[in-house]
Each structure stands twice: as structure tokens, then as C-alpha cells.
Amino acid sequence: MVAFPPYPTHSPAHPPLPPHPPGAVSRHAHWWQRRWVKYGALITLLTLSGLVILALVRQETGTEGFLVGLGLAVLPVPLLLAAFRWLDRVEPGPWRNTLFAFAWGACAAALMAIVANSFATYWIATATADPSGADTLGATVIAPVVEETAKAAAILLIFLFRRRDFTGIVDGVVVAGVTATGFAFTENILYLGTAFGTDQLNGDGGIASVTAATFFVRVIMSPFAHPLFTVLTGIGFGIAALSGDRQRVRRVLLPLAGLLLAMGMHALWNGSTVFGPYGFLAVYAAFMVPAFGLLTWLVIWTRQRELRTVREELPAYAAAGWLTPAEPLALGSLRARRLARDHARRHFGKPAARTVAEYEAYATSLAFLRHRGRRGRAGADFAVRERELLHELWRRREVAQPALDHAARMTMPVVAPPWPAYGVHGVYGVPVQPQGYGPYGQAAPYPSYNPYRTQP
């Protein structure tokens, strides 16, 4: 086996960060532009929505029914959240985005849906004098439009205001899935609590009760229903995130197309009971299960492409001395990443493992940034963002690099990297000094430093 080349002796000195990075609010900004004001307003909105939805659901189900519904509805939530976080392992999004998405779905989106659906159904029943037909029309037409629009609002907000955290299809799937999980959680409390109240009035119980049937259909058979619908919207936003800034029509039409598909599948699911006694099972078997399998394959395939992007883009930074030669290989493998965190935890404790996880996330963001730049999709702040990411890596290198080197040697054959080895005297006696930031020159597809430039 061939040993890795020695690490570069000349360590790059990271350049100073700009005094005011893009998006920073100066001291002279208006009070409503300050971050704490925006966060406070958002938290207040979600809290008020949660209190109102709590009162409405409790009024509909009663206290006992609410508690029963809450206890049953919470069961699939940890599994669904864990599944979406697992999909997001390559470049994990911030927990604050996950919390916001879940809170928006459970509180704001659920409140919008209850109010709008109730108003629309009442208006249709009054106009047509047909309450039964109004309920059917509301469930198959009104509810899909209102609910998917309300859930899509969370994806749009993160897409607009957390753009750095929203870089592709997986991000769209995760945000959409978590939002829909929160929405389904609140909706399940309402349905299960109402079913329990019906059983209490009828004196029914056991496995033949309405509560048991509702639990089986909503929690056992189709806990992924709402996430599956909204994920279509998330995929539209994810593809839009991969588009260039000049492709404005595509960036608008793709999310709208995903939203329309989500509404259509939601309407088909809600209207399955209209197709006869076996309509629900037919739609479930013919559409829901295949769609779930196809989307799961798409997300896993996209994640493998992301890992390949990491392996292809990071060697340039290793050649410049920012990374060790083994890191691009280790960072492009989920198994190696896990081994690196375990190695750091075993030798230095949980803080070291957390440092390695942060290093992996920043390195992945750096690879994606470079990939977008090579394809001409980088924004005007490319150089600033690249500098920030390298700065974060440099701060954590002493803990993370040995752990990743260990993981690389444990998980894959050791081969020479595609760039020449360099040490104290560089290549062929020419000292190699990793450079700072500057243009590539005429062949540069985007602004950055030249990782292969040498000095005599």
C-alpha cells in the first residue's frame, strides 16, 4: 500500500475576514432591521398561532380527547424527524431551521388551514344548501389548495431568508418534510381526539373503535402522507436553488409546478373515498407507495451525488494546503465521517466530536460553493463566503484533521492523491506556499485564489 504524502509544511495563513460581511446589519440600522427584532416577531407569531390552535383543537375535542390525541399523534413524530435528519447528513442544516419548519407546520400552517377550510366549507354549504356536498368539495378541492399553500410558505421563507442553508434538492426535501410533519402532528391530534370523543358518546372501545381505526389509517398506514405531498413542493424549490441567478423564470415556475403537483396528489388522496369502498386501498397501493419509493430513491441518489461533489471539489484546497491529502476522501464518505466523530469522541470527548461534525459541515459547504462557482452559479459574494468557510475550517483543524486522517486510513485503500506530493522543499525543490485570495486569471470561471500557484 502506498503511504499518503507528507502534509504541507507551509500552512496557509487565512486572510482577514471583511469588516462587514454581506447581510450584516450595521450599528446605524433602524430598530426594525435588527436581528433580535426579527427573531422576536417570528417567535411571537408562532407562539400566538400555537396558543390559538391549541384552544381550537381543545374546544373541538375536549380536554380528555385532546390529551388522548396528543399522546397518540406524537408517536410517529420522532421517527419522521429522525428520517429527515438522516437524509440531511451530508450537509446538515441548522437546527433552528428545523425547529422553525416544524413550528410553522404545527402552529401557523395548521391555524391557516383550519380557519380557511372552515370558512370555505361553510360558505359553500350556505351557497349550495348541500352540507354533505360542501364537505366533500372542501376535502377534495379546498383543503389541498389551502394546506399545501400554508406549508409551502415555510419553504419559501427559508429559501428567501436562509439562502445559504438552502442549496439543493435534499435541503428542499428536508424543510418540506419537517414542515409537513409538524402539520400532520396537529391534524392528527384533532382527528384522533375527535374519534375518541365519538367512542365516548357511543360507548365503543377496543380494536373496533373509531379511535383505533383512525390511528391505524393515519399513524400506521400513512404517517408519510403529508410529508410526501409537501416534498414535491420542496423538490421544486430545491431545483430552483440549483438554477443560476439569470434563470429567473425557471426559479419561479419550478416551485409553482411542485406546489401544483403536491395539491394534485393531496386531492387524489383526500378524494380516494369517492372511488368506492376500495378506493382508499387502490390509491394507496397504486400511487402513494410507488411515489414514496420513487422519492426516497431520488433523495438517496441526490445525496450520493453530493458526496461525489465533495470528493471532486476539495482536492484543490488540499493541494493548496488548507486540507490534508486524506481529507477529500474521508469527507466524501459518510462512514468515514462517522468514524472521525467517533474517534474524536473516544479520545477527547463530546466537544471534540462536535468540532469534527462542524468541520465536516463547513467543508461540505465549501465543496458545494466551489461546485456552483465552476458552473457559473456563484453569487457576487463568492470570495467572501469562501473566505468565511476556510476561516471556520482553519479554527477547527487541530482537532478535526487527525480524526479525518484516521478515518480515511480505516475505510479506504490509501492511494496517492491526483496532485504531486510536496513537503519542506516543495515539488522538485521548488517551495510551495499556499496562496491567499486573488483571481485565477483569464481562465477563472469565478473569483477565488489559485490553489496551484507556486513561488520560486
Image (spheres, rainbow, N blue to C red):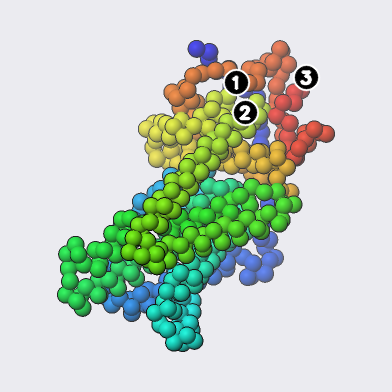
Quarter of the C terminus within the rendering: top right
Frontmost residue, 63 versus 169? 169
Q: Residue at x 47, y 65 (%)?
A: 267
Q: Residue at x 21, y 73 (%)?
A: 199
Residue 354, percent from left and from top: 45, 41
The residue wearing badge 3 is 456
Dot 2 amino acid type: Pro
Residues at circles 1 and 2 in contact by the CB criterion of under 8 Å: yes
* Mark 3 secondary-structure assignment: loop
Q: CA distance from mark 1 to mark 2?
A: 8 Å
Left or right of 203 in this view: 433: right
Q: CA distance from mark 3 to mark 2?
A: 23 Å
Residue 329, picture quadrant: top right
Residue 129, percent from left and from top: 44, 87
Q: CA distance from mark 3 to mark 1?
A: 23 Å
* Mark 1 secondary-structure assignment: loop
Dot 3 amino acid type: Pro
Q: Residue at x 33, y 79 (%)?
A: 59
Frontmost residue, 48 versus 301? 301
Residues at circles 3 and 1 in contact by the CB criterion of under 8 Å: no
The residue wearing badge 1 is 417
Local crowd size for mark 2, using a 10 Å CA cut-off: few (<14), some (14–19), many (≥20): many
Residue 35, percent from left and from top: 59, 63
Left or right of 217 in this view: 182: right
Above or below — where is 441 with respect to 249?
above
Disc assigned to residue 315: 2
